[in-house]
Image (cartoon, helix red, strand yellow):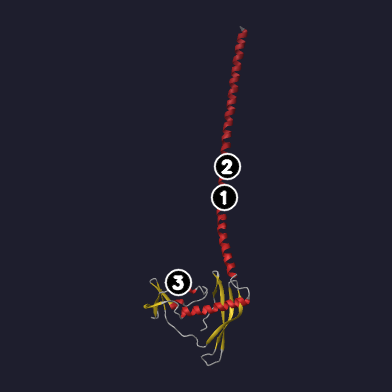
Amino acid sequence: MDKRIFAAALAALMTGALTACSGVRSASETSQEPTTAPTEAATEEATEQETSAATEAVTTAAPEETTTAAEAPQEETTAAAQSADEGLFPADDAALIAKAQEMFDLACKTEWDFTVGPRYELDMNTQIENQYSWPMYLITTPGISSMKDIRNDYHTVFSVTHADGLDEMFAEQDGKAYSLSVGRGGNIFYESSEITGIQSRSENEVVFSVVNHMNGSDFGDGPVDEQDTFSLVAEDGALKVGQFRLPY
């Protein structure tokens, strides 16, 4: 009888111990679970911040690279155009002076056509009046219907740096172009002009000395030589006339 009582008491004691151990283990596991969740959340937040920062850095840097790439071709094109213009002048002085003489003669003819002319075909039955009440006649030459057309024609020979008197000779009205038809005589003493030398050079312009030979003057003098200047300008891939004065 005593042994049975002792066995029952021992069993009760062991059951209580197991229950206590189970409670301790559950409490331990429960206390460890919250620690894992905040750690994972912090790690995810840090990763998102790093990703966002990297994205912003790439986005910020990208336009700078794009701008640089876009500007490079323009700079190369400008440099190539300047280099091409510089190569238009003959390297030999004699050849350069010969080219200047050729362009001077062309400039004389072109300036005469535009300022004395007429340069274009005119309809003498269709006219308007300019600010001085002088008649201006309709230009019928194909492709010439505005001041822009006239200036484009003029600047095939003359540089845009050369001052012109086209507004005095031509007009545009209602989509049509008109021209004065006022002839004048030339200088009766004029004989010829000669490019005699080179005065100065720059990257896009060469200035020359000109001598205009006259066989007399209004004062009854004998032959007279007038000194003048003339220049060629490298412009838009061609040599054009810069400084110039019609000598007759």
Provide the residue designation for mark 3. Answer: 149
Provide the residue designation for mark 1. Answer: 58
Q: Position of residue 234 (x, y in %)?
A: 56, 72
Q: Earlier in the sequence, mark 1 or mark 3?
A: 1
Q: Position of residue 246 (x, y in %)?
A: 51, 81
Seen in the image, is 182 located left or right of residue 35? left
* Relative depth, front residue between 228 and 29: 228
At 58% from the left and 39% from the top, the residue drawn is: 43
Provide the residue designation for mark 2. Answer: 47
Q: Amino acid at mark 1?
A: Val
Q: Position of residue 42 (x, y in %)?
A: 57, 39
State how far apart marks 1 and 2 are (Cα).
Answer: 17 Å
Tell me if label 2 and label 3 are in contact, CB under 8 Å.
no
Q: Amino acid at mark 3?
A: Asp
Element carrying mark 3: helix
Residue sticking out furthest to the bottom = 220
* Relative depth, front residue between 102 and 236: 102
State how far apart marks 2 and 3 are (Cα).
Answer: 67 Å
* Local crowd size for mark 3, using a 10 Å CA cut-off: few (<14), some (14–19), many (≥20): few
Q: Amino acid at mark 2?
A: Thr
Element carrying mark 2: helix
* Relative depth, front residue between 76 and 45: 76
Q: How many marks?
A: 3
At 61% from the left and 11% from the top, the residue drawn is: 7
State how far apart marks 1 and 3 are (Cα).
Answer: 51 Å
